[in-house]
Image: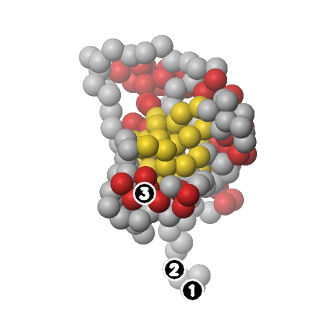
Amino acid sequence: MPEGRESVYLSSNRWDELLAPSITPPNLRLVPYRGELWLSETTTGKLISVGNRHLARLGLWTFRVRGVPYRPEVAKAADLTLGTVVRLEREPDNEHDRNAIAVMSGVGKVGYVNKQMAARLAKLLDTGDRFKAIVVAGAPAGEESSRVQVIAADPALIAHLRGVRRPTNTPREVPQGRAARFFAWVIGDAKRGA
C-alpha cells in the first residue's frame, strides 16, 4: 500500500473487536464492491470479505458454491444476480456426502455447499434453524456464471445486512437456534418504536 493511502479493508487486528458476537445486531451491511456484494463494518466503513473466518460466530455462513461448472445450463438459466435469494436444500441421502446441502435457484440445482461448511451447516438445518441465502457473487440469467458465492443467515439477520427493517405490525415467528439473541434485539427495537 503506497504511503498515505488508507486501505478500504478492515484491518485484521480489529476483527476480534469489531466482529464480536456480543455486538447484536452486528455492525455490518452488504454493499456493492467490484461487481460483488461485500460486508461493510458500519462504524468504520471498512470492507470485510464475505469469506472472513470470524463471520460464522456471528451466524453468517458464506461459501463458494461447488459444482457450478457441472451444471452450466442451470447456472446460465438461473438468475444469480447480486442479492438474489437461493434455497438451501438438505440431501441427507446423498451417496457422496450425508451432510450434502444443495443450492437451489428457481430453475434447479446450481451446485452444493462445500463439504467442510456443509458438515457444520447441516447440523443447524437438521435441528430446525432457518436460513435465508442470497447471492453475493454471480451473474444474471443468460450469462455464464462459473463462480457463485452465497451468504446465508437467519432471515432477520439477512434483512439487517441488506438494510431492510421489518414493519412493526408484521407477525413474527418464534426464533430458534442461534437466532434467538438477534430476534431479541429486533423485537426489543420494535417495542421501543424504532
Q: Marks 2 and 1: CB-CB under 8 Å?
A: yes
Residue at the (32%, 61%) spot, across then down? 142
Residue in the image at 29% along x and 18% along y: 170
- Which amino acid type corresponds to the residue marked 2 in the rendered image? Arg
* Amino acid type at mark 3: Glu
Q: Is residue 33 left or right of residue 127?
A: left
Q: Is residue 148 above or below residue 172?
A: below
Residue at disc 3, secondary structure? helix
Q: Quadrant of the N terminus?
A: bottom right
Name the residue carrying label 1.
Answer: 2
- Label 1 crowd bin: few (<14), some (14–19), many (20+), radius 10 Å: few
Q: Nearer the viewer, residue 99 or 153?
A: 99
Q: Which mark is residue 73?
A: 3
Q: Which residue is mark 2?
A: 5
- Farthest bottom residue? 2
**Foreground of the two, 137 or 3:** 137
Give how far across and how far down residue 119 sits, in percent.
72, 37
Name which quarter of the figure residue 21 lies in. Answer: top right
Mark closer to the observer (1, 3): 3
Q: Secondary structure at mark 1?
A: loop
- Circle 2 — which element? loop
Q: Residue shown at 46%/37% (left/top)?
A: 87
